[in-house]
Every structure is written in C-alpha cells, then in structure tokens.
Amino acid sequence: MRKSMMGKWVSVYSLIVLLLLAGCGNNASGGGDSAKTGAGSGSAATGASADVPALPAAVKERGKLVVGVKVDYPPLGYLDETGQNAGYEIGVVKKMAQYAFGDENAVEFVPVNATNRIPYLESNKIDFIAATLGITEERKKQVDFSTSFFDGGAITVVKKGSDIKAIPDLAGKKVIVIKGSTGSTYLDENVPTAEQIKIESNADAFRALKDGRADAMFHDAVLMSEFVKTSPDYTIVGDQVAFAPMAIGVRKNDTEMLNFVNGSLEQMRKEDYFKTLIEQYMPRAGDLDPMQMIPRPDGAK
C-alpha cells in the first residue's frame, strides 16, 4: 500500500515538474525576443525590427500605434479613392508599425487638423503627430520634435510657354502668394519688386491663377506639385527655396516614444525608404526635384 501511494506521488510530482519546465521555457523565450526587439512581441514571431528602440510599455501592450494624421493634404496625408489613408506621412507611420509590431496595419489613424493636432497630443488621444507639422520655436514649447523627415519649400508655377524660367524673373511680375506664407516673406526679402497678389485660401489662389490674374504663383512645393498633376497647362520652373523642415511631434518629455520615433526614422534613412515613398507619392515635376526634400543614406545618388 505504501509503495503504491509513493508511486502515485512520484508520478504527480514528475508531472508538476514537467509543466513548470514547459512554462519557464515559454516565458524565457518570449522575454528574450521582447528584450531583443525592444518593440512588439518578438522578431521571430512578428517580424518586428531589432534595430529600433523600445516603445513605451503601454503602447507595446496595446499592440498598435494611434497617430494623428492629415486626411486632406495630398500627397502627404489624404484619403484615397477607396477611403483609405494614403500619402508620404502615412507610409512613414506604417513603416513604424512594421518595425514595432511586424505589421504595417497595426496603427489607428486619427484625423487631425492644424488647430486640434497639438491638443489631441496633449490630451493623450494620440501617441504622436504625423500631420505636416513644421518645426517652429513656438511649437517647441508644446511638443518635442523628432528629427526632420521632410523639407518642404516654395516653388514657382507658371503657364507653359511663359517667359518666367527662374525666381529672379518674377521681378516686376504679378505673383499670387498665400497671405502670411513663407513664400510671401521670401519674395519680400529676395524679389521685392514682384507685385504680390495676396490671397487667403489655396482654392481661391488656384482659381485666380487659372483666371489669368497673375503671371505666376509662388507657394508650397507639395501643393503646387499636386496642382500641376491635374492642370496640364501649367508647369514648375526654377529652384525650390525657403525650405521648412517637418517632423513628428511627441508629447513633452516622452523620451521613450521620441527615441522610438527617431530610431525608426534613422532606420528608414539607412534603408533609403523615404526615396521609395517620395517616388510613389511625389514624382518629379518640371524643375522640382523631390529628392532634395528627404533624408538619404550617406553617399546616395
């Protein structure tokens, strides 16, 4: 009887030991992968990148990024014909989700505009802003900026056949600008004899150009490149100037998120991924060279 009971206890004990070992083995494996990747739940299982810093624990546990983006600013952030988020900045965020979770779709896009994007960030509705956010001293008081991943400038658009071929040719000409824009300031300082026609909205400015109210329009390179795509009678001429760096906005003192974002952007630069995106969303038009607007690997051509 005692031998029988002893045999049963040995069997039970052996089973418990086996279960404990199996459990420990699983935990060790998962912890090791997570520590290596610093983001997501293990590169072997998810394809998450081991080359970017860790996400904040709460975001990693949630399993997706929540990001404020533009939906009305092609080609940087907009809704395509199927209603899906598309654009250069959208591609950047999807790549971050790929690095973090091994899945480019592990992201929730939250539509924002120039007015609400920083309040959304400050109230924790989003993890960070990827919505045409230019770096300014005033905004630095509210958000921490990533490294720049896009430098938009101002360019000149004229009707094909125009005698305006470069920015100096705007001297003495009627030029449409957006009131208060960097383009307007640039002309004040560099081509003061240009007769600026200052208009409030982009739509009204484009309409004025097509109505022949001016010889040229001098404005944001991104918007003007979209304009010439749908307006074949017009072309871009001359150099791009007045560059203004754009970056991702992160909550003040959110060091872990900023490190993840900056690490992701640096990895994209090394992979020359910005080139892939710019070729997809902003091909060369006239004299505009979009390759001037993005970070490239050292020595890239």
Image (cartoon, rainbow, N blue to C red):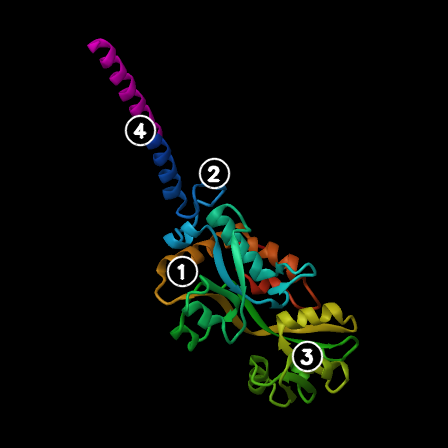
Q: Which numbered disc, 3 or 1, marks the residue that appears first in the sequence?
A: 3
Nearer the observer: mark 2 or 4; the answer is 4
Please, what secondary structure does the residue beneath circle 4 have?
helix
Q: Are marks 2 and 3 in contact (CB under 8 Å)?
A: no
Residue 45: give its label.
Answer: 2
Callout 1: SS? helix
Left-right relation of 97 to 258: right
Q: Which residue position holds label 4?
A: 20
Disc 2 residue type (three-letter):
Ala
Q: Position of residue 88 (x, y in %)?
A: 59, 61
Find residue 258 and name its label. 1
Q: Quadrant location of residue 275?
A: bottom right
- The residue under the point 46% across, 54% down is 264
Q: CA distance from mark 2 to mark 1?
A: 25 Å
The CA span between labels 3 and 1 is: 36 Å
Chain part drawn in magenta: 1-22
Q: Are marks 4 and 3 in contact (CB under 8 Å)?
A: no
Where is residue 125? Give x, y as percent.
45, 65
Residue occupied by mark 3: 203
Q: Which is more foreground, mark 2 or mark 1?
A: 2
